[in-house]
Amino acid sequence: MILPIVKYGDPVLAKKATPVTEFNEELRQLVENMFETMYAAPGVGLAAPQVNVSKRLFVMDCSGGKNPEEKIVLINPEIISIEGKQTGDEGCLSFPNIYFEVTRPKRLIAKAFNVEGKEFTIDAMDLTARCIAHENDHLDGELFIKYLGPIKRELVMRKIKKRIKLGDWK
Ligand code: NI
């Protein structure tokens, strides 16, 4: 089932999400729906708060459905270490058609639980590392606009306000 994606301005996106405690059928269903929603959008990552569920999990697939190994879910993730830097364009499904450069770690190691409740470690580079950093921020109510300097941020906010006014923010 494709779930509605909440856009910037919705308070759920600014909330710190709570840990997943039950690894049950309801969670499996949510994960399945989140993958379906992410692929349909289309996007490479989707965090639970973006579908109005304030829980600590996100799905991602940096291959866009081409490589089954890259289709992963991180539940109650924790970033253990970061290394280096990369700068590149980034978008967010809660900010339709807004893209700008963000600097993120080049490499990142995280641990998380899978949908069965089994803990695993992921050692990610480049786009995968960028995606984990971006989605993990969502779980703490942080959004990618926080990485913009004051002038660029003002420009982006003005663009968003204009689009909200025009009804073009859905
Ligand atoms: Ni996002």
Image: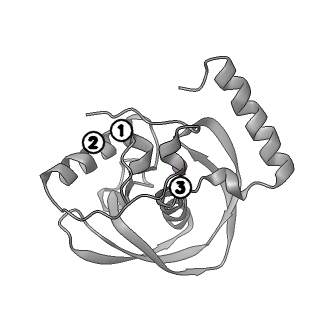
Task: Tell me if I can see residue 66 in this picture.
Answer: yes
In the displayed image of the protein, which residue is found farthest to the right? 151
| Amino acid residing under circle 3 | Gly
Q: Is residue 59 left or right of residue 107?
A: left
Which residue sits at x=67%, y=43%? 99
Q: Where is residue 147 in the image (x, y as percent from the top left)?
A: 71, 58
* Label 3 sits on residue: 141
Dot label at residue 76: none
SS class, disc 2? helix
What secondary structure is found at the residue carrying circle 1? helix
Mark 3 vs mark 1: give the one in front: 3
Q: Mark 2 points at which residue?
A: 33
In the image, residue 159 sits, relative to residue 86, either above or below, namely: above
Q: Name the residue under label 1.
A: 37
Sequence order check, earlier mark of 2 and 3: 2
Q: Quadrant of residue 98?
A: top right
Q: Going 25% across and 47% down the picture, which residue do you hit? A: 30
Which of 32/157 is in front?
157
Q: Quadrant of residue 86?
A: bottom right
Q: How far apart are marks 2 and 1 (CA)?
A: 6 Å
Label 3 Cα crowd, 10 Å radius (few <14 / some 14-19 / many 20+):
some
